[in-house]
């Protein structure tokens, strides 16, 4: 039978709305990262209170489920100690001759444009455990990364 004759509503032909994907693995966060998550949950709750459009309510509730889950599963990591790169470390390094500085943070706090790199990113994984003066292989190149300094 033709769809034109059996359709009960237009809703069944809309694109499905999926949940926001939760990154795999532990939800490690810095103190700043947890504060950002808490602020996001509070902002969404306040936004939800003022909505009347059903589509917007559904969108905000979906976002609230994501951020509420991230808040509930957050594991605040202590500040890094020692000379080796760890979660929360700020690392100055040279990659292919270009000097960069990044801080290793949680997935939700990451913003590579400002030097906040997720601890699960390939570059972060290459840096973890390294110390100043180490040369690391990366991207199929031996010695592609030269670690210049590691700080908290």
Image (tube, rainbow, N blue to C red):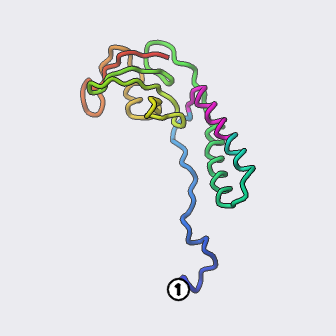
Q: Residues within 10 Å of mark 1 (few under 14, many from 20)?
A: few
| Residue 38 within the magenta-colored segment of the rendering | yes
Residue 75 image point, x, y percent: 60, 30
Residue 5 image point, x, y percent: 58, 86
Residue range (magenta) = 28-41
Please tell me whether residue 129 is drawn above or below residue 63 in the rendered image: above
Query: Would residue 30 be found to the left or right of residue 93 on screen?
Result: right
To which quarter of the image does residue 37 belong? top right
Query: Would residue 130 be found to the left or right of residue 89 on screen?
Result: left
Between 84 and 40, which is closer to the camera in this rendering? Answer: 40
Please tell me whether residue 29 is drawn above or below residue 66 in the rendered image: above
Between 72 and 9, which is closer to the camera in this rendering? Answer: 9
**Secondary structure under the numbered disc 1 in the rendered image:** loop
Q: Residue drawn at (63%, 76%), measured in percent from left and top?
A: 9
- What residue did someone put label 1 on? 2
Q: Residue drawn at (24%, 26%), measured in percent from left and top?
A: 142
Q: Residue drawn at (56%, 72%), measured in percent from left and top?
A: 13
Residue 20 image point, x, y percent: 56, 50
Please tell me whether residue 103 is drawn above or below residue 122 in the rendered image: above
């Amino acid at each position: 039978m033709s769809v034109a004759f059996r359709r009960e509503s237009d809703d069944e032909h809309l694109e499905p709305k999926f949940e926001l994907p939760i990154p795999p693995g532990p939800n490690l966060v810095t103190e700043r990262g947890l504060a950002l998550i808490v602020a996001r949950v509070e902002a969404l709750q306040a936004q939800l209170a003022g909505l009347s459009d059903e589509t917007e309510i559904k969108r905000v509730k979906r976002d609230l489920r994501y951020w509420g889950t991230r808040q509930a599963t957050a594991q605040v990591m202590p500040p890094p100690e020692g000379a080796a790169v760890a979660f929360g470390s700020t690392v100055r390094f040279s990659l292919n001759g270009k000097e960069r500085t990044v801080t290793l943070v949680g997935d939700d706090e990451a913003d590579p444009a400002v030097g906040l790199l997720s601890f699960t990113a390939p570059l972060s994984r290459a840096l973890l455990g390294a110390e100043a003066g180490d040369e690391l292989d990366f991207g199929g190149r031996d010695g592609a990364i030269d670690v210049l300094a590691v700080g908290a």
